């Protein structure tokens, strides 16, 4: 899947796409799935509940946010690829986080959901959205968006949050 052009997404989402190295975004998603598992499976209960500042998310909240965002981006990609012409709505990440109750869930439950969503994401972009529909433009929050851009945004959004977990939470991030 080629890197999306600037015409396929709003400037805001370019920050996530820019984080993805050249190559295949789906291959990167598969590789990062393994990295996420290793990272979160090794966190102590104290690390899972850590907040680097008042009112900031815990690592569990961050993982739930990655899941919710990926699920929402995939819904948008499916709608656009299938020809839905309506303007797809904004997703309020803070509202979603508030009602996700991630910190009341066991880590293995969050990781199982993460892997199920990731597998569905890869299958959606790999098999369910044909090449001739990947660059179709739809509207998301009154901005142009293509399914291809949404795949790259999913990959870059995760990279963004893994860097935050490393830099602000001090979590040991492995890159191999």
Image: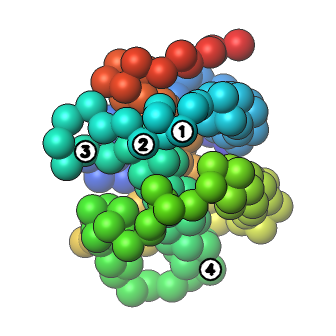
Q: Residues within 10 Å of mark 1 (few under 14, many from 20)?
A: few
Q: Are marks 3 and 4 in contact (CB under 8 Å)?
A: no
What residue lies at 37% left-to-right and 26% top-to-bottom? 169
Q: CA distance from mark 2 to mark 4?
A: 40 Å
As helix, strand or loop, the secondary structure at mark 3 comes to loop
Q: CA distance from mark 2 to mark 3?
A: 11 Å
- Residue drawn at (62%, 80%), measured in percent from left and top? 82
Residue receiving disc 4 = 82
Q: Which mark is first along the chain, 4 or 2?
A: 2
Marks 1/2: CA distance? 6 Å
Q: Name the spot of residue 89 as percent of width and height, x first.
A: 33, 77
Q: Residues within 10 Å of mark 4 (few under 14, many from 20)?
A: some
Q: What label does residue 45 carry, if any?
A: 1
The CA distance from mark 3 to mark 1 is 17 Å
Nearer-N-terminus badge (3/1): 1
Q: Secondary structure at mark 2?
A: loop
| Callout in the foreground (2, 3) | 2
Residues at marks 4 and 1, CA–CA distance in whole angstroms: 42 Å
The circle on residue 118 is none
Nearer the observer, disc 4 or disc 1?
A: 1
Q: Earlier in the sequence, mark 2 or mark 3?
A: 2
Depth check, front residue: 121 or 79 = 121
Taking 26 as reference, is 131 above or below it?
Answer: below
Q: Which residue is mark 2?
A: 49
Circle nearer the N terminus (4, 1)? 1
Q: Is residue 97 visible?
A: yes
Q: Secondary structure at mark 1?
A: helix
């Amino acid at each position: 899947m080629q890197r999306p052009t600037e015409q396929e997404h709003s400037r805001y989402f370019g920050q996530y796409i820019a984080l993805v190295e050249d190559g295949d975004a789906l291959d990167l998603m598969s590789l990062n799935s393994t990295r996420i598992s290793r990272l979160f499976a090794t966190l102590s209960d104290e690390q899972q509940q850590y907040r680097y500042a008042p009112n900031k998310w815990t690592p569990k909240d961050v993982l739930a946010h990655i899941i919710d965002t990926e699920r929402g981006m995939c819904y948008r990609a499916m709608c656009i690829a299938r020809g839905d012409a309506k303007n797809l709505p904004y997703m309020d990440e803070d509202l979603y986080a508030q009602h996700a109750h991630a910190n009341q869930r066991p880590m293995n439950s969050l990781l199982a959901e993460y892997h199920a969503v990731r597998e569905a994401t890869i299958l959606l972009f790999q098999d369910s959205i044909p090449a001739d529909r990947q660059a179709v433009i739809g509207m998301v929050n009154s901005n142009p968006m293509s399914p291809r851009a949404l795949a790259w945004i999913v990959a870059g959004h995760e990279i963004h949050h893994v860097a935050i977990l490393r830099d602000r939470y001090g979590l040991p991030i492995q890159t191999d």
